[in-house]
Image (cartoon, helix red, strand yellow):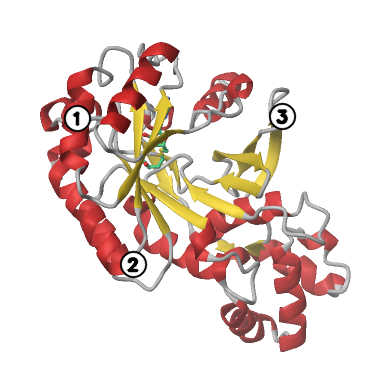
């Protein structure tokens, strides 16, 4: 299937002129509509005949919002997007004083197998194309008033492992940061990985001022292997070395994500190990309590233990803060809405 949101302006122009004999200015108009996630029927300045032809061969809106949940607590919104083949993915919009951050998915499902994560329970269904990742941003951005940018920041932290879909993610980054597109600065974009080390290094060598996050969750190799199988391929030390390399190449400090799971990674010895691993490395640690997913049987650390863990780290000289949890009442953790939706369909 041809997804028009996969194309940048030049590619779209080439495609439309070659196949439909369309003039460049019409291609530009269509590109404008695509950037607003407007479907063919809404492209009012494009001839009906051309729209009908395109409708038969291509898809305009690659991620359609089919369900929206809004948190009564903090206004966080969760979206379920439908793709052209009926697959669904989810995204979360978090509202802050400085702007709105959209968390997007990079794959349908995930094959990384992290034990605490809902996204990976059914394995990987397929990769998203660049346009399907972009489509999530464009569809949510279109909910704004059109004057100001609605989505100001993006985190690749939804379902999927972005570095397991490297080429499409890179293409997405080019599209979303393009001046002809919605032109979001890469400084406002974060990519989170479970630690696909060679790709972290490759990313470091690219010319993106992208923020990188490593999901660590345990500093002991043997224990991390139990909850994050990627550790069998790349050790904790190799992942941290890749963070050092990222800083060296880009000047950007990597964020280390540490999700506290009750009784598994939240003791003093875990804090000590984490501190010794990260001492002298330019990183910042983000602490969060596990969002319980019913299928996993794992529980989040209590408020008390979380505070203590944070204190330990701070006393041990590690730069760490607690990440605010948002959208608690709408199942903020990745993959949960999609799973519920799929259950309902059965
Ligand atoms: N695959 C990437 C990005 C997607 S997961 C990665 O691993 O980083 C985004 C973040 O949410 C990761 O830090 C992941 O470990 C965390 N996460 C997954 N399930 C969670 C849950 N139930 N509670 C809290 N954090 C969770």
Q: Is label 2 within 8 A of ligand 1 (CB to nearest ligand atom)?
A: no
Q: Is residue 21 left or right of residue 190?
A: right
Q: Nearer the viewer, mark 2 or mark 1?
A: 2
- Residue 244 in the image, given as x and y percentages of width and height: 22, 56
Which of 102/114 is in front?
Answer: 102
**Do the residues bearing badges 3 and 2 touch, measured as CB atoms within 8 Å?**
no
At a point 42% along the width and 35% down the height, the residue shown is 321
Can residue 57 be seen at all in this image of the molecule? yes
Q: Nearer the viewer, mark 3 or mark 2?
A: 2
Can residue 296 be seen at all in this image of the molecule? no
Work out whether 100 lies above or below 1.
Answer: above
At a point 74% along the width and 71% down the height, the residue shown is 32
The residue at which mark 2 appears reads as 250
- Residue 10 in the image, given as x and y percentages of width and height: 59, 83
Work out whether 125 lies above or below 293.
Answer: below
Which of 62/241 is in front?
Answer: 241
Quarter where residue 53 is shown: bottom right
CA–CA distance between discs 3 and 2? Answer: 37 Å
The residue at which mark 3 appears reads as 70
Q: How crowded is mark 3: few (under 14 residues within 10 Å), some or many (20 or more)?
A: some
Q: Residues within 10 Å of mark 1 (few under 14, many from 20)?
A: many
Give the SS element for disc 3. strand
Which of 338/249 is in front?
Answer: 249
Q: Which mark is residue 133?
A: none
Earlier residue among tags 2 and 1? 1
- Residue 104 in the image, given as x and y percentages of width and height: 53, 46
Earlier residue among tags 3 and 2? 3
**Do the residues bearing badges 2 and 1 touch, measured as CB atoms within 8 Å?**
no
Quarter where residue 71 is shown: top right
């Amino acid at each position: 299937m041809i997804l028009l949101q996969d194309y940048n302006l030049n590619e779209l122009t080439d495609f439309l002129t070659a196949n439909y004999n369309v003039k460049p200015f019409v291609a530009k108009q269509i590109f404008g509509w695509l950037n607003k996630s407007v479907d063919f029927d809404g492209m009012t300045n494009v001839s009906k005949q051309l729209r009908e032809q395109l409708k038969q061969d291509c898809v305009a809106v690659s991620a359609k919002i089919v369900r929206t949940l809004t948190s009564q607590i903090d206004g966080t919104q969760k979206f379920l997007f439908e793709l052209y083949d009926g697959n669904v993915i989810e995204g979360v919009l978090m509202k802050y004083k400085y702007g709105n951050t959209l968390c997007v998915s990079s794959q349908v499902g995930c094959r990384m197998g992290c034990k605490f994560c809902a996204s990976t329970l059914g394995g990987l269904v397929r990769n998203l194309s660049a346009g399907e990742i972009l489509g999530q941003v464009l569809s949510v951005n279109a909910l704004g008033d059109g004057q100001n940018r609605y989505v100001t920041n993006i985190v690749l932290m939804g379902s999927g492992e972005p570095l397991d879909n490297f080429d499409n993610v890179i293409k997405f980054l080019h599209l979303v940061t393009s001046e002809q597109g919605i032109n979001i600065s890469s400084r406002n974009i974060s990519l989170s990985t479970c630690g696909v080390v060679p790709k972290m290094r490759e990313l470091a060598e690219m010319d993106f001022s992208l923020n990188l996050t490593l999901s660590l969750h345990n500093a002991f190799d043997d224990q991390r292997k139990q909850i994050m199988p990627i550790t069998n391929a790349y050790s904790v030390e190799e992942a941290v070395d890749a963070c050092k390399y990222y800083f060296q190449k880009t000047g950007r400090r990597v964020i280390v994500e540490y999700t506290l799971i009750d009784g598994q990674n939240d003791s003093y010895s875990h804090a000590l190990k984490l501190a010794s691993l990260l001492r002298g490395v330019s990183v910042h640690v983000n602490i969060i309590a596990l969002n319980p997913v019913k299928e996993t049987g794992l529980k989040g650390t209590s408020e008390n233990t979380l505070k203590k863990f944070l204190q330990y780290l701070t006393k041990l000289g590690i730069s760490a803060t607690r990440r605010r949890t948002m959208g608690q009442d709408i199942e903020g953790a990745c993959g949960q809405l999609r799973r519920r939706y799929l259950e309902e369909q059965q």
